[in-house]
Amino acid sequence: MSSLPRPPGVPARRSGSSGTSYGKTTTPRTPSPQVIKATRHSSSSSLPPPPSMTSPKKQQSTNYAQNLSRSMTIEEMRELHRRAQRDAEAKQTELRLVLASRYRELVGSSDEVTKMGERAQELHELVHALPDLMGKLIQCAEEDTSEETKDAGDGAKEIDKVTILRQDLAALPRRVHRALDTNNVHEATVSLLLLFRLIAEQTQDFPLASALAPDVIFSPIPNSNTMLQAQMKMTFLHVQTLPAKIIRQSTKILDSAASFGGTPEFGAQTSASALSTLDLLDISDKTDRTTKLLDMYFDSKAALLRGFLSELNPSNSYDGGTDNTEEILSKIVLILQYDIILHPYQMFILRKFPCAPQSGSTVEGITKSLPMFPASIVQSKVSNFLSAHLPLIRTKVKSVLVNIAGTTAAALGKIRQSLYDKTDGLECMERLDNNGICSWEEAVSGVVDVQVVLSSSHGVGGGPILHGETTAIPSKFSLWGVLFSNTFSSLVNSLLTTSFQSVHTRVVSTLRESLANAPPLSNILPHEAYRNTLHIATELDSALLKVSADAHELLVHAEEREESERRLKQSLYVQTCEILGRLLSELRRMLLLPDKSQAVMNLIVGRLCHLLKYRLTALPTLLDPNSSPAVLAGTSGMISLLELSSAFELADDNDDGLITFQEAMEAVDSAFSGTQHHGAEMVRETLLLPAVGEKDVAPASLGANAKSSTPQDVTLNELTLLLARGLRHEQSIKHSALGTVQASLDAIISDSFSKWAKEVLDPCSSSLSISIESSIGIFSSYSEEEYKRINAHAESSIATQIGPVVGGVSPHVAAFVLELSSILDRSVCPSDSLLPVPSVEYATSMGINGGDIPRMVDTVRWALLYNGLEIVTSLLDTQIGVDSAETKTKLAEACPSGLIQLCNDISFIRSCFFVRNKYSFDKDGADHPSKTKLDGLNRYVTSLSPDGTSASVVSRIEESHRHVFEVCDLFLSSLFGEDKSSSVPVGDISDIGSSLGQGQASGASPLFHAPVPSSCRFQLLPIQADRTLSGVQARTKLKEKEAENRADSVGKGAMRAGLGFFSSMLKKN
């Protein structure tokens, strides 16, 4: 509550309507005693004191009001009035609440007093009635005494019977309760039935007692007294609810597991006691007791199993509840071992089981009340129970274990080992055999029809790993084999499928991220592209090895190593083929996407496939031909590669090696017709395509989600890998799975670098086309004399000679060849010049021909040479070809020297690619089509010039070619290879000028001097990719070494200049 306004007597205030202006300060006045008193009262209370009826008080209140009116404004007085009203209302509310709470307490106290009075009255009446009750009791006792005394001689025998009967009536209820307290329902039932038998012999007033003792003859004791009748009535009223209680307790025993919670060996006694109790207390029709008791027993166990299966909720396994899952699975195993197999054999077949020493019951006492159970009926019941419930248990267990493996994979191996120890472990078998009655094998052979159980449950929910695998039904029954062995194998197969799909997704997403972050083609650095693609290839290889190692650790165990390892190898083989088929299909389809940075994509994808070809060290083991389904599981239901190839060729109408997805579905369906495989579904599953009925997404969404995209086409090699589970791969390297992978990678590498080369050479092609067209125009527009005057050197006498001028190679032609070499140098890094394999044996194990192992630089060089030759040949054929009438006219009007220059350029192109080039195109000895085309063009142009075939012209053309090769040898050697004939020995530096043909002929110094040959090449220069500590230390050591050797540097002049060039490159980091 906020404080009240300032009380009267405050020195400063604002004037209201009294004529004093606002904002002025009044002169302080001395307060009167009344004001001082009012001020003291206001400081102790929030409100002014109420007015008094006496005259002095009234006068004082009037003065207080006047002081308030003088010292406060109207608004302040109104605020004071409102606050006073609020305080008064608050006090009134508080007073009402206090009175109400006290009233409720008073009313409650009065109710308690009333109840206490009633209880006191009841006690008072009971106390006053006690003397009357005691008198009646004494009177009854005296009457009994007088009667016994009177008939002492004649009724002694009847008195003894009555006494014994009354003693039994008093003792048997206590015996029943003691037995129920110890959960001994059979002893309680026997005692209760004996009690009902005694009552039924004496009276027929109790139908329940008569119903539970149907064979009792009614023979009451004559002249029985009222006390016996009263005692029987009181005893019956006391125990009449016990049969229902015993039935509930027996049913509860049957509904619980007798195999845990106590000693499993004595569980048969507990179950037999419960069955015997329910049979004894059953007052309905006693016909077909055997079937009724068996149904009751197995129905209770079925409900028990369903309860435990419901507790195996897959969602709970995400919360780390692996311990709870293992506990529940262990209980299910114990129920199957004891409650379903071992205990029924002891109770129903042998009618013999261990009894607890402190139970007080015997085997004979329990079994004599049970009917005889035929062995065939018991075996049928147990076999049908197992046939119905084992598949359900496997399915539920698999769903739970899949979730456990997805979150805590390490716990899966622990659960597997624990379940094996509790089903087929040595300690488990010893515990099952050491029951003193029978062995586990005897119980299984007695109550389980092995063939019926295994045949009905084999392959359901936990069948073989692969669809084409056929496994013979074992003759021996094992809970591990029928429940968990195939379940874990199928689970590992599902885990492998998920793991491989995850690996594929990570690889493709990493590649797409690398492509998205890649710089333009003009700024991309080769060592960065190499490093990124090497990271992807290394991660893929590590992921494959890790998945394989985890699967071996999870599935391969010493107990069943041979079988589990066989299944795992087969699954790894199939899954590896499928992931590589998906990955190769994805990489190939990425090259078809329209993208502005297609050259960058082609370069990165090509480099990645080149590394995948040699860096996937896991493939020789995972794709071992001896691990294929055809070798491990047989060829039943599988097709050959020839059958698939025939179906593919029928679907490939245009013979381009590609078929659409719909065509592939139809072709695969026709190839697998008559087998258990569905070829179209296999392709759909392995390519992660939408299911039937789902909407397909356009190919433009390939980057968003690989599963929701339908491929435009597939190749035969991709189908060969995707259909590995139903295809018989050949043993030969070429047609094996590993050979198919290598062939697919080779095709992608060739296609990607070919497209890359065409795109990077497109500017050079345009420039060359314009220059050739311009040159032909110049040749046709100039006369011979004018051409000689313009193009001949002033210091030579060529202009005055008779005959055509033979100049050097045209600048645009030489520039095109040098640009090829420059692109090669810019597109490779030092690592590209190294062999991608450490040895020939390693290459052979990877399915690669050890005699022909291309390096990355060879692949890039071949792409540039092949596409450069195709481009220049196509341009020359377009500009000079005989099919163009306009070109014929221009060439016919060209001057002879121009035609000779054109022949010089054509022959230079031919010499570069087929003479100077050490990496020949003609591996099989046949002429290359471009070589034939260039020769035809050269003959055609030469035929137009009268001096084109003269020896002097040919000699000078060859001399000009040699001059260009010698001058540009340093730049051309990386593209065409080292030319020993063009190199100049170190000792002949002074003869460099004389060795140049044209310079010697002209008598002038050459324009270029050939560089000194050096052992340092660009491919061997280190490129610093990462600024690591080791790199910094290496550069420091290099600088120190250079400082030490600076004084001892070799030679001067050209030698010093040559080495300085490479030293300057080493310093650029």
Image (cartoon, helix red, strand yellow):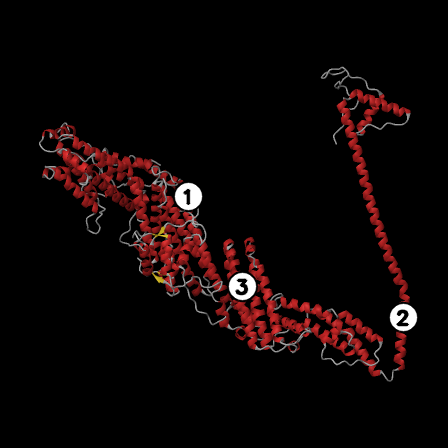
State the residue in front, 1032 or 957: 957
* Residue drawn where x is 60% and y is 74% of the image: 291
- Which residue type does callout 2 highlight? Lys
Residue 620 visible in the snapshot: no
- Report the side of 858 relative to 422 (left or right): left
Residue 229, image x and y in percent? 82, 75
- Which residue type does callout 3 highlight? Ile
- Mark earlier in primary sequence (2, 3): 2
State the residue in front, 193 or 923: 193
User: How packed is label 1: few (under 14 Cα within 10 Å), some, or many (20 or more)?
Assistant: few
Q: Which residue is mark 3?
A: 393
User: How packed is label 3: few (under 14 Cα within 10 Å), some, or many (20 or more)?
Assistant: some
Q: Quadrant of the C terminus?
A: top left
- Report the side of 826 relative to 541 (left or right): left
Residue 336 visible in the snapshot: yes
- The CA distance from mark 3 to mark 1 is 44 Å
- Mark earlier in primary sequence (1, 2): 2
Disc 2 is placed on an element classified as helix
- The CA distance from mark 1 to mark 2 is 104 Å
Q: Which residue is mark 1?
A: 513
- The CA distance from mark 2 to mark 3 is 69 Å
Q: Which residue is mark 2?
A: 136
Disc 1 is placed on an element classified as helix
- Report the side of 999 relative to 181 (left or right): left
Residue 533, image x and y in percent? 37, 46
Residue 381, image x and y in percent? 56, 72
